[in-house]
Image (spheres, rainbow, N blue to C red):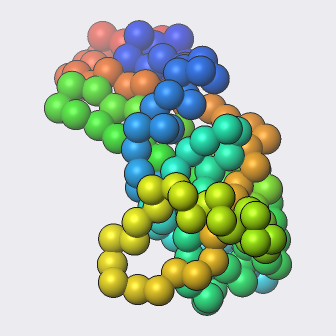
Amino acid sequence: MSETNESIKKLSEDEAWALLSTARFGRVAVSIAGQPDVFPVNYVAQAGSVMFRTAEGTKLFGLTANEKVAFEVDDYTETEGWSIVVKGTAHALETEAEIAEAEQLPLKSWIASVKRHYVRIDVHELSGRRFIFGEEPDPELDAS
């Protein structure tokens, strides 16, 4: 499927931020010892960044060892879907002021667990696409 296909629309940065702000669940991709790993997180997007909470463990270690991360969010209905990909630099919040500000955000864990660390991804690159669903084209009719 080419980028010029009417079923795929590249989103503007404003459209991508607007959609990113509507969802609450995404996936952060990190590299640990040269191997990729992906973790689901609850998040809030605001002011050029993505914030989430985490407990101590592999995810936090991975962010500390290699601060360059990717973050992905998507959603869909019966007729369309969208996907946003963020690339940026992640760091655990450390100052009292940063943590106090983060505690005001609606970052609620889905599971009953203690997540004492706040992480902010400073967004350096943002891309998004909207997909219109439909029947797969007949390959015999699509000679392109």
Residue at the (52%, 81%) spot, across then down? 115
Where residue 138 appears, x then y in whole percent? 25, 19
Residue 101 pos. (x, y %): 65, 58
Relative to the observer, which residue lies in front, 95 or 27? 95
Residue at horizontal 60 percent and vertical 41 percent from the top: 46
The answer to whether residue 57 shows anywhere in this view is yes
Q: Is residue 56 found left or right of 64 in the rendered image? A: left
Residue shown at the point (52%, 51%) measured from the top left: 44
Residue 13 versus residue 121 in the image, above or below: above
Residue 56 pos. (x, y %): 61, 88
Q: Quadrant of residue 37 in the image?
A: bottom right
Residue 43 relative to residue 119: left or right? left
> Going by the image, does 95 lie left or right of 12?
right
Q: Give above or below for 1 relative to 71.
A: above
Residue sitting at the far left: 78
Nearer the observer, 28 or 22: 22
**Count of all numbered marks drawn on residues in the image:** 0
> For this rendering, which residue is in front, 51 or 20?
51
The answer to whether 10 appears left or right of 61 in the picture is: left
Residue at point 48%, 17% (across, down): 9
The answer, for residue 28, to whether it is visible in the render is no
Determine whether 107 is above or below 122 in the image.
below
Q: Position of residue 109 (x, y in %)?
A: 40, 71
